[in-house]
């Protein structure tokens, strides 16, 4: 469930790329027509189907690209509100190439060590202050909240008060 936003983002970018195929065929379908304005019924079938495909793919790609960070934020909030506290060790970090107010969204791979269960590996994308990046390197221990069923995780900001356990 925690990987769903990144899958949505990938699918959105693929749809955006594929959208250019019918966009180009729209112009191919218009070759040979005189200049002017046309009613829908006067357009060649290739141009009509290309316009429909461009519209559908554009709408879906925008919905995926906009919905991805919204879903990620909802999952993050749910984990912070309903999760359990644990410690985790950072296995790796990578740049998602997304920034919000000049702060990066970082992809973390974590080894989570709950007090009441077996350790597991989890991944999450999280907005991190640029000032906190040196502390969040592979091998560092961090406090996290995790959902026991889905293993979705959220890093806790050590500067803020911890949520109740």
Image (cartoon, rainbow, N blue to C red):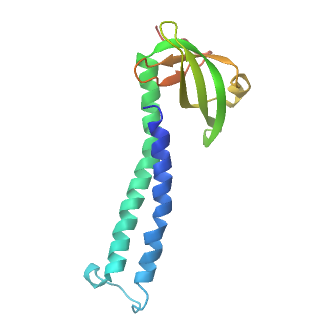
Measuring from the top left, give residue 21's x and y in whole percent: 47, 69
- What number of labels is visible? 0
From the viewer's side, name the closer residue of 65 and 119.
119
Measuring from the top left, give residue 156's x and y in whole percent: 56, 18
Hey, which residue is sitting farthest left in the picture? 41
Measuring from the top left, give residue 142's x and y in whole percent: 62, 17
- Give residue 127's quadrant in the image: top right
Q: Quadrant of the N terminus?
A: top left
Position of 72 relative to 115 (above/below): below
Residue visible at 40% across and 82% down in the picture: 29
37 horizontally vs 21: left or right: left
30 horizontally vs 136: left or right: left
Measuring from the top left, give residue 59's x and y in whole percent: 38, 57
Hey, which residue is sitting farthest front in the picture? 118
Residue visible at 43% across and 54% down in the picture: 61
Position of 44 relative to 85 (above/below): below
Hey, which residue is sitting farthest right in the picture? 134
84 horizontally vs 88: left or right: left
Residue visible at 33% across and 73% down in the picture: 49
Residue visible at 59% across and 19% down in the picture: 157
From the viewer's side, name the closer residue of 109 and 135.
109
Position of 98 relative to 107 (above/below): below
């Amino acid at each position: 469930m925690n990987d769903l936003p990144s899958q949505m983002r990938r699918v959105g970018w693929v749809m955006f790329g594929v959208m250019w195929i019918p966009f180009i065929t729209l112009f191919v379908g218009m070759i040979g027509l005189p200049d002017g304005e046309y009613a829908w019924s006067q357009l060649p079938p290739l141009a009509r189907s290309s316009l429909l495909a461009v519209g559908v793919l554009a709408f879906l790609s925008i919905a995926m690209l906009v919905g991805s960070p919204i879903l990620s934020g909802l999952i993050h909030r749910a984990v912070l509100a309903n999760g359990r506290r644990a410690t985790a060790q950072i296995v790796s970090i990578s740049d998602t190439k997304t920034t919000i107010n000049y702060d990066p969204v970082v992809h973390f791979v974590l080894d989570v060590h709950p007090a009441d269960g077996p350790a597991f590996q989890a991944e999450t994308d999280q907005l991190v202050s640029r000032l906190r990046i040196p502390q969040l390197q592979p091998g560092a221990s961090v406090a996290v909240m995790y959902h026991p069923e889905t293993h979705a995780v959220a890093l806790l900001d050590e500067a803020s008060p911890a949520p109740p356990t």
